[in-house]
Amino acid sequence: MSISDALAKLLEQAGSAPHEYRTSLLTFAELDVERLKLELQLTEKGAERGAAGEPQLDSADFDAVEHAVVTRIETERKRAHQELLDASNVYRERMHALDFEGRVSVIQNAALNGLSQYKAEVDKGLDRLHGLRRHVQALESDVDRFRADNKLHRTAHYPSLGMRTFYVGLALLLFLIETVINGQLLAKANALGFVGGWIEALTISTLNIGAGFMLGRLGVPNIVHIKPARRMIGSGALLGYLGFLLVLNIFVAHYRDASGQALEHAGRLAWESFHAHPLGLGEFQSWVLVGIGALFSLISFLDGIHFDDPYPGYGPLHRRLEVARADYIAERQHLIDELQHIKDECIDAMESAKRDLTKRRAEHRSLIDGCTRVVRSFSEHMNYLERVGNSLLGVYREANRAARGGKAPKRFNESWIMERPHVEETVSQVGWPTERLDSVIEAAETNLSERIHQVHDAFAEAVRSYERLDSVVEGDDGAARAA
């Protein structure tokens, strides 16, 4: 299960209503007393029975009319009591929907799982950094060994990527200029015309510019190598380059002169002229072109020398180390940012869960208050029904007494007391005891607060672990070294 799954458990139902019911206030309908009087014919029956001397003066029980009144009122009492039971069931279902125990259990388990998985993510990040760190250490060892073997006491010196691009661009520009110059001169006298002249020009520029750059990059730097054989190779490359520079550009000048004299056998004529009189060029312009070609080749040669560290092999090795360090630092920062994001999500989910518990406690209190109001309303309705019953009995008895001429059973002066259903435990059966609920929620909130602190601590410890893995110091080469 991923961290997002654990957080989903915390966020489940948070922010939404914890039940599917709407708050409602139950009211008990009042009776139409006047209509009941007419339906029960209390006045008529009271006068009729009073004229007949019914009920007898010593009677102790209700007569049929009085029983009819009491039965009608008790029927209404039973209906109201059933409404109360139905309402209490609704409140009980709404309380059950709050599901405090289940919600608290889910929150605690999800918070614990989220924290465990957060720590697992930290460990995974450490494993990834360890691999990169070992690669950096291996390259550092290679650089240290290379410097020790070659007695180097400095850091590598090589141009930035922008300067390296500039050097390549400059070499290409010189190549293009020389090709254009030679192409214009050779195209006129070449047997193949424009195409042949430009092919010859490209070949000459490639030899002149390309050889200068490659010898400056790969050959001549060996002069400073610690091994004598490599120094000899470097010296030979330098002397060979200088000789090649002069020979190539002077011969090209002879070739241009020969091309201007004859379309055919220009190469043979140029070689004979060069062999007989190397410096015997016919025109001053030819010497100018020799100078331009040599200058371009020298510039390209210097480009090659400055393209990387002057010591062979030092620059590429050092760049590999810098790239590995940059990758390591970037990965570490990425892991920290990722943990920061996960931490924020985890804490937001826990805070949301705490707010949800508070909301549910308020809903519980609201339900208890609502149920209490319904019970109070029911008790008041019972008092009302008892008053209505006595009022109806009074109508019958007054009519009966009037028909008797003032005489009536003594019980006519007594009030009827309606039997009341027991409703005291209705509220307590609906909700949780306040003390127990407060205790459960406070324990859950305390647990969440502890988990939040633990997530903060885990993040701080993760950052410290990453930093301990790579305590950056200044090495003797002036570069950032991982201790």
Image: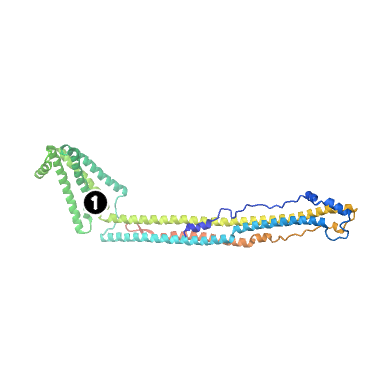
Kindly tell me whether residue 79 is visible in this rendering: yes
Looking at the picture, how far across and down is residue 359, in whole percent?
59, 55
> Which residue is at the front of the view, 396 or 479?
396
Kindly tell me whether residue 469 is visible in this rendering: no
Looking at the picture, how far across and down is residue 240, in whole percent?
17, 51
In terms of image quadrants, where is residue 250? top left
Q: Is residue 350 left or right of residue 264?
A: right
Looking at the picture, how far across and down is residue 265, in whole percent?
11, 41
Residue at horizontal 87 percent and vertical 54 percent from the top: 50
Residue to which mark 1 is pinned: 217
Q: Residue furthest left?
A: 276
- Compared to residue 76, the image places residue 268 above or below, namely above
> Does dot 1 land on a helix, a strand or a loop?
helix
Image quarter where the C terminus lies is bottom left
In terms of image quadrants, where is residue 270? top left
Residue at horizontal 18 percent and vertical 56 percent from the top: 232
Residue at horizontal 26 percent and vertical 44 percent from the top: 170
Q: Residue furthest right?
A: 405
